[in-house]
Every structure is written in structure tokens, then in C-alpha cells.
Amino acid sequence: MSAILNLSIDLSKVDKGRLVDGKYLNTQIFINDESKFGNNVSVAYSQSKEQREAKEPKQYIANGKVVWTDNVIKVAEKEVENVVNEPKKDDSLPF
């Protein structure tokens, strides 16, 4: 999947208390099929499971639009590292 999005983030809406380690802001990006005011992309703060279950409203901090796409959107898959489990050494055995 390839896409290019143009976003305009309203920094005055960013709650500095939501920054992780003082520099990371966890957000969700929504891409809609329909547009409003020429924008079909929005950004909101990420919500916890409890906030979603309580149906708390999303707090939007940015909007924008898709300016290019290859018309194929896929869910990103997490790469799995090959971890080799070595047997534990048991020094209590006499041999």
C-alpha cells in the first residue's frame, strides 16, 4: 500500500501532558471515503480501551486529505523475529 497524506496539525490543540517521554504523541489517523471541506483524513489522540468502552468522544487535533494513493490499502503486519531458545544449562547434574 502506498499513500501520501497532507496533514495540518493544530499545535495549540496538543495537550503537552499527553507527550510520552516529553516528545512522542500517540495518535490515530482516520482515512474516510467521503470528504468534508475537501478533507478526508483526521487525527485524534489515541484512546485507551477504557475510554473506547466508555464511548468517550475522540479529541481531534488535525485534519488533511489523501493526495495520492495506489488504491490498495492493507493492514500492516508485525515482523516476527526468529528467536532461538537455547536449552538452559543445569550445573546441578553430576555428569
Image (spheres, grey):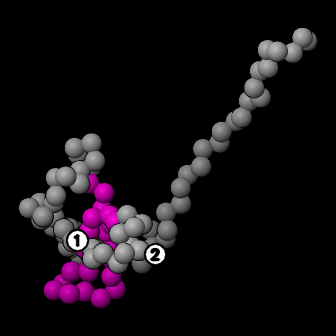
Q: Residue furthest left?
A: 12
Q: What amino acid is found at the position of numbered circle 2 in the picture?
A: Val
Residue 68 in the image: state x and y as whole percent: 30, 73
Q: Position of residue 87 (x, y in %)?
A: 77, 28
Quadrant of residue 69 in the image? bottom left
Tell me if I can see residue 3 in this picture.
no
Would residue 42 be found to the left or right of residue 92 on screen?
Answer: left
Q: Secondary structure at mark 2?
A: loop
Predominant SS of the magenta segment: strand
23 vs 11, left or right, is: right
Above or below residue 30? Residue 87 is above
Q: Which residue is mark 1?
A: 59
* Magenta range: 25-47
The numbered mark at residue 72 is: 2
User: On the image, which quarter does residue 8 sit in?
Assistant: bottom left
Secondary structure type for disc 1: loop
